[in-house]
């Protein structure tokens, strides 16, 4: 089964869809949406197929780390031993992020209707963006990863430039500059690793490597390499620090509140639920496995800062006076909780953080979906069905993480790790803040009257939107009751690198 090029299918299927949409007439918005959702369904079917064929067993040998491997040599210059590969595969962390991407894309398509003149161009950009993101998460070669990585930001820039309403905003321009700077840091990191690690070729000769699995193995480094763990210089530690900073930039430096104020919900979904996740991916996929010697010293420091920021942002959330400020603040709180979980550095806490990344996407997809239809005046108080009444209640419970909902397990495990690491007082304060945020969530939603005024069942909402919302609601409850299989997928990667 692993011989099936399923990863390339996931990467290039959106490109094929983008070509089809490009060939369609400009004023066929209904057809464009049909094509977009049809291809999204095909991608989702493929990722579900992978889920049922994913081997969750733990293998001590790192050669079993990637599954569904595809590797093709694109350039081979024997004189300089230069080999450039298209190399992709999936591990436990990659799968979570690819699943998040494919799950999110249909909602992006459903929220790009605000500017009907740009539906076609926006759809093309979203397809291309989903292709490069999947390429980023599935790459098993560093150079291949970086090509997809840079293409992602190029397409993101073109996508946002296509929305004339806020591309000139200074805050966004500065944020985008920081993202480009962090990408430059990552390029230097890749070149340093390539100079430091070697692969053994078929003829027995050594060759500088771009293979990610090679960078995970300490025996692959030569003593004189600039980022070799055997080299006594400080470049390796400096690279670690700059990579941490670059990753945190990608997570937190996004003007979410401004996007919400501009009512550009599909940009909100793209920036907050897709692009921001790249920072977490870099930490989980590269920083923890490649720099294990610095984790015990630096991660506790970051966790301490995260605890302090959690208190500050929680107070900010409690004082928020509008739904937009509240949502952006709660999203930041989710990210801080994830960072704390990762920096507590155990298999349990990091697995919980990875699950929390998935929970964040599911919960905020539903939340942004409601806000979008409120803006479109698709919400009223008439003929409200029981099913639609229940969704906001589920959403509120899921945001806070009450028992039986997806975020409960992940938040419980992270809070448990906080209790084991810190004093009882910190643990009690965090629990109290969670409780206060729960009541504040209910109050601000009632005040804004944006979510408890739900869809008009009989006249407004279409069946397609029901079909997309319902699986998310089911997923919230299912992951709250049975998260075990997702944990097995995550464990298959983390057991190699954490204690």
Image: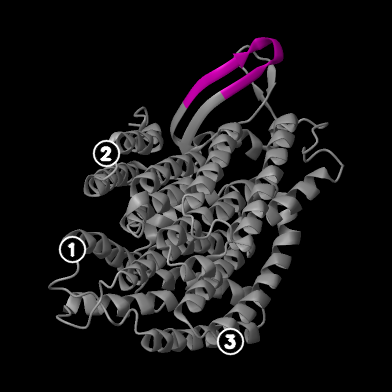
Judged by depth in the image, the label closer to the viewer, 2 or 1, is 2
The residue labelled by disc 3 is 428
Quadrant where the image shows the C terminus:
bottom right
Q: Quadrant of residue 199?
A: top right
In the image, taking residue 354 as reference, residue 445 lies left or right, namely left
The residue under the point 45% across, 44% down is: 129
The residue under the point 63% across, 58% down is: 175
Q: Give the dominant element type of the magenta stretch: helix, strand or loop.
A: strand
**Which residue is at the front of the view, 412 or 406?**
406
The span shown in magenta is 71-84
Near mark 3 (Cα within 10 A), the count class, few <14, some 14-19 or many ≥20, is few
Res 343 seen here? yes
Q: Looking at the image, is mark 3 or mark 2 earlier in the sequence?
A: 2
Residue 231 drawn at (x, y percent): 83, 38
Residue 378 drawn at (x, y percent): 25, 71
- Could you tell me how far apart the alpha carbons at marks 2 and 1 are, in whole angstroms? 25 Å
Dot 1 falls on a residue whose secondary structure is loop
- Could you tell me how far apart the alpha carbons at marks 3 and 2 are, in whole angstroms? 60 Å
CB contact under 8 Å: marks 3 and 2: no
Dot 2 falls on a residue whose secondary structure is loop
The residue labelled by disc 1 is 462
Q: Looking at the image, is mark 2 or mark 1 earlier in the sequence?
A: 2
- Colour convention of the picture: one colour
Judged by depth in the image, the label closer to the viewer, 3 or 1, is 1
- Could you tell me how far apart the alpha carbons at marks 3 and 1 are, in whole angstroms? 45 Å
Looking at the rendered structure, which numbered label has been put on residue 25? 2
**Which residue is at the front of the view, 223 or 112?**
112
Q: Quadrant of residue 201?
A: top right
Q: Quadrant of residue 280?
A: bottom right
Looking at the rendered structure, which numbered label has been put on residue 211? none
Q: Looking at the image, is mark 3 or mark 1 earlier in the sequence?
A: 3
**Residue 83 painted magenta:** yes
């Amino acid at each position: 089964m692993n011989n099936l090029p399923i990863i390339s299918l996931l990467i290039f299927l959106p490109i094929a869809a983008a070509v089809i949409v490009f060939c369609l007439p400009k004023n066929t918005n209904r057809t464009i949406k049909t094509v977009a959702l049809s291809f999204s369904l095909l991608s989702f079917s493929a990722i579900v197929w992978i889920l049922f064929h994913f081997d969750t067993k733990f293998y001590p040998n790192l050669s079993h780390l990637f599954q569904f491997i595809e590797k093709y040599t694109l350039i081979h210059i024997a004189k300089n031993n230069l080999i450039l590969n298209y190399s992709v595969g999936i591990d436990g962390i990659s799968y979570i992020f690819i699943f998040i991407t494919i799950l999110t894309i249909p909602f992006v398509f459903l929220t790009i209707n605000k500017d009907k003149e740009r539906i076609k161009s926006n759809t093309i950009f979203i397809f291309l963006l989903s292709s490069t993101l999947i390429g980023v998460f599935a790459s098993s070669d560093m150079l291949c990863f970086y090509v997809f990585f840079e293409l992602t930001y190029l397409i993101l820039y073109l996508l946002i430039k296509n929305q004339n309403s806020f591309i000139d905003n200074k805050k966004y321009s500065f944020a985008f500059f920081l993202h480009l700077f962090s990408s430059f840091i990552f390029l230097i990191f890749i070149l340093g690793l390539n100079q430091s690690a070697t692969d053994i070729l078929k003829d027995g000769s050594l060759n500088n490597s771009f293979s990610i699995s090679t960078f995970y193995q300490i025996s692959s480094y030569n003593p004189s390499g600039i980022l070799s763990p055997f080299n006594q210089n400080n470049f390796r530690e400096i690279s670690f620090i700059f990579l941490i900073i670059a990753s945190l930039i990608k997570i937190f430096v996004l003007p979410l509140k401004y996007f919400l104020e501009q009512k550009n919900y599909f940009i909100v979904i793209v920036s907050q639920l897709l692009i921001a996740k790249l920072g977490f991916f870099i930490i989980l996929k590269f920083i923890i496995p490649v720099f294990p010697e610095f984790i015990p010293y630096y991660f506790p420091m970051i966790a301490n800062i995260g605890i302090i920021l959690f208190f500050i942002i929680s107070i900010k959330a409690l004082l928020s006076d509008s739904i937009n400020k509240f949502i952006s603040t709660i999203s930041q709180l989710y990210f801080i909780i994830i960072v704390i979980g990762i920096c507590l550095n155990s298999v349990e806490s990091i697995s919980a953080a990875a699950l929390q990344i998935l929970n964040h996407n599911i919960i905020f997809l539903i939340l942004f979906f409601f806000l979008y239809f409120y803006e479109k005046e698709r919400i009223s108080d008439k003929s409200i069905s029981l099913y639609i009444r229940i969704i906001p209640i589920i959403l509120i419970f899921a945001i806070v993480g009450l028992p039986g909902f997806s975020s409960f397990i992940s938040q419980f495990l992270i809070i448990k790790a906080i209790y084991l690491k810190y004093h009882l007082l910190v643990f009690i304060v965090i629990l109290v803040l969670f409780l206060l945020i729960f009541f504040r969530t209910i109050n601000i939603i009632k005040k804004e009257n944006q979510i408890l005024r739900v869809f008009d069942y009989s006249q407004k909402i279409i069946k397609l939107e029901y079909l997309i919302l319902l699986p998310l609601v089911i997923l919230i409850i299912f992951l709250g009751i049975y998260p075990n299989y997702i944990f097995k997928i995550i464990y298959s990667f983390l057991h190699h690198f954490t204690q």
